[in-house]
Amino acid sequence: MGKTFPDIDERNAQFIRDQHVFFVATAPRAADGLLNLSPKGLDSFSILDPHTVAYLDLVGSGIETVAHLRENARIVILFCAFEGPPRLLRLHGRGDVVEPGDAEWDELAAHFPNYPGARSIIRVRLERISDSCGYGVPLYQHEGPRSQLIEWADRKGIDGIEAYKVDHNLESIDGLAGLRRTEESA
């Protein structure tokens, strides 16, 4: 039977730390807008306090999460156990986007490795924390993180990443505004 929690306690914090992947879901306000669900990995998630979490958003082909958060702030993060006992943990909340150059960037960025291609930090103030059984989730064995994203960003270099963000991260597939700093530099 699923439970709700008033905050991220040590048991939930340990469960989060033990997972190698998490999923982020957002949606625009428009009824015909496209929902977004993105897997995340690497060492990119941090618990800031019992009611606030953040993850490092690395350059990718789309900018849906950032655009949706800028429009309506709604987000849910899902952790699911692929190893060990079955369990799902959902973190519902309101998110905001912090970009390099913003006043809070350095303080938040200190919680993460210095990955090339970091385009924003998504901070979420939690409104609902709940778990459920996860009985239907298959067992998988973790072999390790993939290296391709970091290698790609290293090959692109700073100028190449900035150009990529201008080409791919100015707006969502529904036409919502994406990265603010990229808009200013375009």
Image (tube, helix red, strand yellow):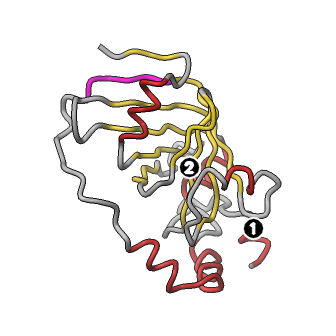
Question: What span is in magenta?
Answer: 129-134
Q: Residue at x 43, y 71 (%)?
A: 149
What's the mark number on residue 55?
2
Tell me the quarter of the image containing the C terminus. bottom right
What's the mark number on residue 181?
1
Magenta stretch containing residue 74, yes or no?
A: no
Magenta stretch containing residue 130, yes or no?
A: yes
**Residue 79 coordinates in the image, percent (x, y):** 38, 38
Q: Residues within 10 Å of mark 2 (few under 14, many from 20)?
A: many
Above or below — where is 45 with respect to 156?
Answer: above
> Count of labels shown?
2
Amino acid carrying mark 1 in the image: Arg
Mark nearer the N terminus (2 vs 1): 2
Residue that sits furthest to the right in the current view: 103
Q: Residue 99, located in which quarter of the rendered image?
A: bottom right
Q: Secondary structure at mark 2?
A: strand
Amino acid carrying mark 2 in the image: Tyr
Q: Secondary structure at mark 1?
A: helix
Residue closer to the observer: 130 or 20: 20
Magenta segment, prevailing SS (helix, strand or loop): strand
Q: Residue at x 47, y 31 (%)?
A: 13
Is 113 placed left or right of 130 in the picture?
right
